[in-house]
Amino acid sequence: MILLRVIGFVVAVTLLILALQRYRRRSLRVPDALIMGGLATGLGIISIAPSIVDPVLRELGFPPGDARRAIGLLILSNILAYVLLLRAFAKTDRLEGILGDTADRLATRWFQQEYATEELRGVGPASGKVAVVIPALDEEDSLPNVLRAVPEIIGGLKTESIVVSDGSTDLTERIAREHGALIVGRDMRRGQGAAVKLGYQVALLRGADVVATCDADGQYDPLELPRLVEPILAGEADVVHGSRVLGAYESPVRGRSHGVKVFAWLTSRLAKTQITDPASGFRAFTPEALTVLEFKENQFHASEVTIAAAKRGLKIKEVPCTFRERSAGVTKKPPIFRYGLGYTRTLLRTWLG
């Protein structure tokens, strides 16, 4: 026990010195410095006089004694370490959010500078159009077919394809530009949900009358965009979902079709709106709907759309759509079980939020 106390005291002094040095260099904030200094001081006191914690340990069911004291302190230290770990996770999440928002602002600024000149020359309308947001991550093989299939006119409005490159490292951006799409290039990879959200922001900046989404992997048919957009133009809905349950679901991955049914039942109960395919990535929005909806999920974006729209009192409608096997490349979705857990977490968090 003597050796353990000596080691504890040396560690305590070292931690205290490090805390003071880092605080003086302003590399440690006041709360962190206080926590680090408090831990060092407490460890030092316990190393010098272990019996000082006996009253606390006795209340917790650990009678006096070196062995019992060591076990009690070990349990308390584990609890403290867990609390500090949760705090570190929270700080990491905040930092990730700050970096992500910065990356989005830079991408938006670059986009505005890149295409402002085109608008001044009259290349591309500033309004009176349907913006088709296409999130893409390394989709150089499938993207050309998707962009070629996007109709030039939908409901009398010109279409404008906006490809949001979520940190692509292949020729996705170059191919999108060659096919006449607008490019939102973001070097920081954040996930499909964050990419779609960035695309919504850019579409609103472009003055779109309708904003639709379509995947870059070719699983949704762009030729069905007029059917998706029609309820928006007719004033029948604020948010429209394409439903593969009402339409065609070609060769579903084993277990995924059952998952769609389960989440459809759960989403319908939570949103109090009948939904057959809540995980669809084929959607359309009015600009007004996008200005009031707040999307927070970087990955499982689809699960929050219906709940968020229902909570805002927006009119939601489903139309049939076709879901196919991807034409090229590999899927970026996580395994089915992990996807299901993430989807459920997002669904409940959106409902409770």
Image (spheres, helix red, strand yellow):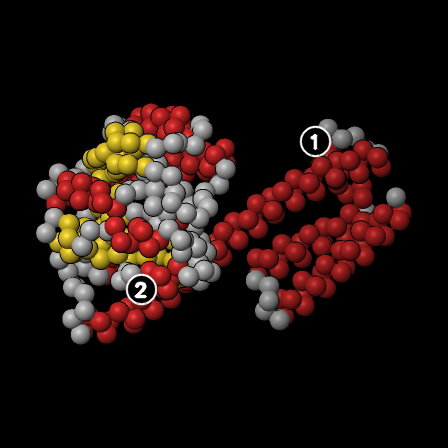
Mark with earlier residue (1, 2):
1
Q: Residue at x 65, y 39 (%)?
A: 79
Q: Residue furthest right?
A: 2
Is residue 322 toward the left or the right of residue 301 in the image? left
Return the x and y of residue 233 as percentages of the image width and height.
12, 45
Which label belongs to residue 178? 2
Is residue 173 toward the left or the right of residue 316 in the image? right
Q: Using a 10 Å C-alpha cutoff, classify the residue at mark 1 as few (fewer than 14 neighbours), some (14 to 19) or many (20 or more).
A: few
If the image is split into quadrants, where does the N terminus sit? top right
Q: Amino acid at mark 2?
A: Glu
Q: Residue at x 85, y 47 (%)?
A: 4
Q: Is residue 307 in view?
A: no
Return the x and y of residue 216 as percentages of the image width and height.
35, 50
Q: Using a 10 Å C-alpha cutoff, classify the residue at mark 2 as few (fewer than 14 neighbours), some (14 to 19) or many (20 or more).
A: few
Q: Is residue 151 in view?
A: yes
Image quarter of residue 182: bottom left
Q: Which residue is mark 1?
A: 60
Q: Residue at x 78, y 55 (%)?
A: 11
23 and 91: which one is in front?
91
Return the x and y of residue 304 as percentages of the image width and height.
34, 40
142 and 340: which one is in front?
142
If the image is split into quadrants, where does the C terminus sit? top left
